[in-house]
Every structure is written in structure tokens, then in C-alpha cells.
Amino acid sequence: MSILDYFGLPENYSQHGEQVDQMNSVITWLMLVLFVGWSTFFVIALFKFWHKRNPKSSYAGVKNHVSTHIEIGVVVVEAVFLLGFAFPLWAERTDKFERVVANDPNAPRVRVVGQQYSWTYHYPGNDGVFGRTDNTLITGDNSLGIDPEDPNGDDDFISTSALRLPVGRDCILQVTSKDVIHNFAIVPMRIQQDCIPGKEIPMWFKPVKELETYVVCAQLCGEKHADMKGSMEVINAKEYYEWAKKRSDEELAKKQK
Ligand SMILES: [Cu+2]
């Protein structure tokens, strides 16, 4: 039983999420041990060094080395967590991303664009290539500024309702922002990434089960930050590709008219 079960953390739905939970669990155990240890020490100190019992202060202080040994123990445990858990987890996430990109050129990719206070999802369409975007081209009908001159953008489609992704595939989200810094966070996937204006930063994960959930902004971005929620649907892959193709075909037909 993980200690996190007592904190009501939502169920994990991503392939790498178990490692994140394990990491959080061991850190929480360490924090619990430290909390109980320091609290006990504090209460002992209150009684032991009560001024009525010690009218004169001791200038010699502590003579044994127990506290030094405990401190060293804590440093060793923290080093084990950092080198044994955190670094390997991070290395695996970053190394694997290169493999995901190399092995699966058709991995589902979505551009996630944050703005005060909503999310827009830009899908590359049937060709799998995003059309060029330029903020100076943004108009009421073209909220992401997709360049109409770029043929790669003809079959692109956007969605402001839900982020749809297929189950069992490595999904790559390229997150960015139109105004201030936001953070795209999907708690059941145990992943989040800052959205920085002018940058497109990839984040990736593999959903292992279908689900309907919501995404949130995890970076205080303005007065309605708390309303910056969006929904997300992980559906079976066949259904996903049929839906994406249909949306892309519709978009293409509209442009050819
Ligand atoms: Cu926000």
C-alpha cells in the first residue's frame, strides 16, 4: 500500500506514472519520518531545557555526536533518492523521447495553445504536418494564426472543446502560449509542462487506459486562472483515427470550396 493512497491522488492512467508515484511515495515517507523525528526532538527540548531547571546556560553545549550522525543519515537517504530514483526517471523520460520520435514518426501529435483563459488544440490533419503559424495572422476566424498560404495547413483542424488522444500510443503534445506563461497539467497522466510564449515545448506520455478527465492550468496566469480548465478524452485508437480523418477531410473540403 502506497502512502499516497491516503492523500486521495487520482488513479494513474499513464505508462510512466507508476514511477512518478513511487518517487513521490518514498519522498513522502522520508518527510513523515523527518516530521515525527523533529517534532519529538522539539518536545524533548522544551522539557529538558526548561529555564526553571536550567537557570544557568551551558557554555559547553552538546558533547556527543548523535545529531551529526543523524544529519549524515538524512543526507545519505536524500542522495539515494536523487541518484537512485530521480535521475534515472528523468534520464529515462528524456532518452525515451528521442526513441519515440525516431521509432514512431506517426505518433499522434497535437499543438496545445494556452491563452488567458482557455486551451486550443491544433491537430496536423491527414498529412501529419502542422501548417505554419504566425501570431500576426491571428484573426477572429483564425484563432491560431495558421498560414493560409501554407499547403501543410489545409487539412489541419483545431478543437476548443476536448483534447482527444488514442489509448496505447505514445502521444506528443507541443505546448505553447499566446500571451503569458501557463502550464498544461494532466494529473491522471502524471505530467505537466510550462507553456512559454514564442516557444513550442514537447511533452509526451502513453495513456494505458481510456478515460474522460480534465486538464488544468498549473501556473498562476491571471485573475481567472482557476477557470482555466479543459476536458480530455482518451479513446480507442481506431475510433480516434476515424474521428481525426473525418475532421481533417471536412477541413480540406471547406478550403477547396
Ligand atoms: Cu493559468
Image: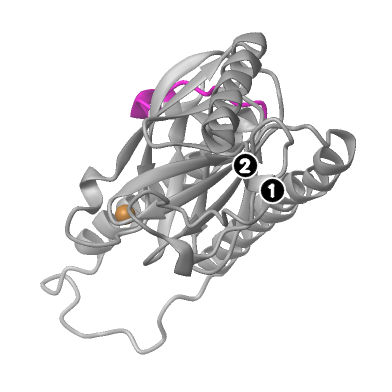
Q: Is residue 8 magenta?
A: yes
Residue 125 visible to an observer of this rendering: yes
Q: Position of residue 212 (x, y in %)?
A: 42, 18
User: Can residue 81 be found in the magenta stretch?
Assistant: no
User: What secondary structure do most residues of the magenta stretch adopt?
Assistant: loop
Determine whether, in the image, residue 1 is placed left or right of residue 174: left
> Which residue appears at 83% of the width and 37% of the height?
105
- Mark 2–mark 1 Cα distance, whole angstroms, equals 5 Å
Across and down, in percent, residue 58 comes to 32, 84
- The residue that mark 2 highlights is 154
SS category of the residue bearing label 1 = helix
Q: Position of residue 90 (x, y in %)?
A: 71, 50
Question: In the rendered structure, which segment of residues is drawn in magenta?
Answer: 5-15
Q: Is residue 121 above or below residue 239?
A: below
Between 188 and 87, which is closer to the camera in this rendering?
A: 188
Q: Nearer the viewer, residue 183 or 154?
A: 154
Q: In the picture, which quadrant includes the C terminus?
A: top right
Residue at 46%, 69% in the rendered image: 136
Q: Which mark is residue 219?
A: none
Say what amino acid the circle numbered 2 marks.
Asp
Q: Residue at x 66, y 14 (%)?
A: 237
Name above or below for residue 184 compared with residue 196.
above
Do we see residue 130 in this rendering?
A: no
Q: Quadrant of residue 156?
A: top right
- Left or right of 56, for residue 144: right
Q: Secondary structure at mark 2?
A: loop
Instruction: Say whether residue 177 is left or right of residue 75.
Output: left
Q: Residue furthest bottom?
A: 59
In contact (CB < 8 Å): disc 2 and disc 1: yes
- Looking at the image, the residue that sits furthest to the front is 257
The label number, if any, that marks residue 151 in the structure image: 1
Q: Ligand 1 lies in which image quarter?
A: bottom left
